[in-house]
Amino acid sequence: MTATFHAPPGGAAKRGLIEVSGFSLSYETLDGAMPAVEDTDLVVRPGEFVSIIGPSGCGKSTLLNAVAGFLKPTAGRVTVDGEPVKGPGADRGMVFQQYSLFPWKTVRENVEFGLKMKGISADERTRSARTLLGLAGLSQFEDHYPDRLSGGMKQRVGIVRALATGPRVLLLDEPFGALDAQTRQIMQQILTNLWQRLEISVLFVTHDIDEAIFLSDRIYVMTARPGAIKAEVDVALPRPRDAGLALLPEFLALRAELAALIREESLKAMGGELNADALQGLAINLHGASIGDVI
Amino acid sequence: MKHSTALASVAVASDRFIRETGEPARAGSVTLRPARPAPAPAQPAGGSRWTRWLRLNRGLIRAGVLGLLSIAAFIALWHVLTENRLNIYVRFMNVPSPTQVLASAEQAFSDGRFLNHILISCRRILLGFSLATVIAVPLGLLMGRYLLLRELVFPVSEVLRPIPAIAWVPMSIMLWPTNEESIVFITFLGSLFPILINTLHGMATVDEVLVRAARCLGAREAATFREVYFPAALPQIFTGLTVGMGVAWVSLIAAEMISGQFGIGYFTWESYSLVQYSDIALGMICIGVLGLASSLAIRAVGSLITPWATRR
Ligand SMILES: Nc1ncnc2c1ncn2[C@@H]1O[C@H](COP(=O)(O)OP(=O)(O)OP(=O)(O)O)[C@@H](O)[C@H]1O
Ligand SMILES: [Mg+2]
């Protein structure tokens, strides 16, 4: 099995340490440098599943893109297994929020792409791709072009494609954002299975609290822009997890805690005027009167 | 799947809420319908591949039938106007009728001279258009990828592009030692710019996330170019080739009418000088048919090698 995924010798679980320290990144704009992320530290230990959640625009994608090697930090360091990240590479698989399959390649050719770049022979590529597609329940669709797949299938292929080269870490930027709730749940299960079987580290960006809890060992909560780490939350829920998890009191407590943290930041992100009291006021005004009465 | 059964067992655990079909509904009750057999995979009613092809391509067939009808109507109108020698401000007195054109076509094809004109025109198109493709496609791809090249070449191409082929005729005759070369050159110029512009446009619209995905999978510059930029731009390149082919014919005919002693454009113009009116129409129809055929051929090649862009 390990040979099929081109996993490195010595056990994959020993590798895949992501360290981000003193990280800041500003975008150059006409109004000057706009800080997107400021002074952030985070770590993903080998084999760990870590999520980043935070309000829209807080710099989650920015951080992830820096780990992927698409952006250079303005200050600080990003290292994977101790090596500074210099640019994108096959040691860090990435799954994007937008569907990013090559439309001119069939499902199998998409999955084979990374192996082809490694110079692996066509036969071996096909074998690896088939194994992985089987794991993700996509065997029937290997000869389809992406435009004939549903959104969930496309993202499954995207994940499988990113895993095919045997990366040390997998980076996912809101990969299930466009999917419906049921499909999301199934995708989360599939991702968990793949993560456990391939023993890699995962850094997962989402704004869905339930999703973060369901998947993660640890969750980083980011502040509103410019983003920094606001809280680090251990998810000490047992595995394997299933949809019944959502009924556990521990889950509900964790979720309430995370929701409060994020709500605070979302209000900040929406502008200084809105605060919790003001929203409370709106709710009180409606008490006793129907919407129709108010209007 | 495992968790969904778990969820179901939670929600439907108490049979107090489950009722048989037919029982009156209570608030919050769940009615389970008997499971239906799974649908057979992709085997729709109505037999063979051939009939299914017919059904899927109904639109195409309809367009074909209507197209033939409209061409028939056009010929019928032409027939009525010319046979009656109508003179309604526009004068149809000297315009050859379809039957006259058919007669002169029979005569023209009876000796090899007319066929020779056609072959010479086709050869010029093939040469000029191929040269344009071989130059404009790689140039456009490189210009799309390398800003410096684009900044250097684009202004020149933008100034030259609006000059119509016919305006190039005198210059071309001065530039090239033989007449043949100057006509091919004009054909080449005509198709060069549409191909170049469309290739550039194709490169500009390549989805950045695909490039990033390729990078993350270990693709370097050359591989990204070959595996992402080129296939992503291909459908647009073929649009350019189709347009370029059309302009190549326009340019060729203009060049042949002004200079040279061969070609279908020359034949058409000479027929006017020789007062062979039905040959004028014959020449025109030939140009139309050849232009159409070459455009269709390019489209066919295009849909053959970009199946993802045209398949339904
Ligand atoms: N290229 C850019 N130039 C200038 N500002 C940018 C650029 N890209 C992002 N930003 C800004 O940086 C901030 C962080 O962006 P980022 O995309 O990382 O946020 P995010 O947390 O991923 O948001 P979302 O949840 O909406 O995807 C945003 O306020 C955004 O407007
Ligand atoms: Mg984002």
Image (cartoon, coloured by chain):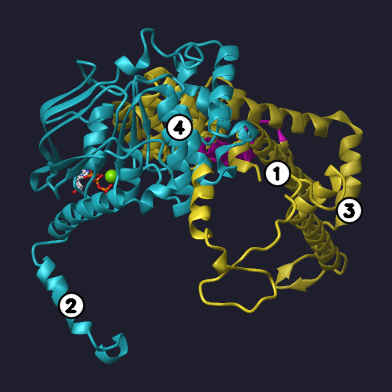
Chain colours: A cyan, B yellow
Magenta stretch encompasses residue B261: yes
Q: Quadrant of ligand 1?
A: top left
Q: Are marks 3 and 4 in contact (CB under 8 Å)?
A: no
Q: Nearer the viewer, mark 3 or mark 4?
A: 4
What is the C-alpha distance between the residues marked 3 and 4?
78 Å
The 10 Å Cα crowd at callout 4, few under 14, some 14 to 19, many 20 or more, is some
Kindly indicate the quadrant of the structure image that contains residue A230: top left
Labels 1 and 4 share a subunit: no
Residue A107 is left or right of residue B204, and the answer is right
What is the C-alpha distance between the residues marked 2 and 1?
68 Å
Three-letter code, disc 3: Gln
Label ID, residue A282: 2
Instruction: Identify whether B96 is placed above or below A1.
Output: below
Q: Does dot 4 land on a helix, a strand or a loop?
A: helix
Label ID, residue A192: none
Q: Are marks 1 and 4 in contact (CB under 8 Å)?
A: no
**Chain ID of residue with mark 4:** A
The residue tagged 1 is: B292
What is the C-alpha distance between the residues marked 1 and 3?
23 Å
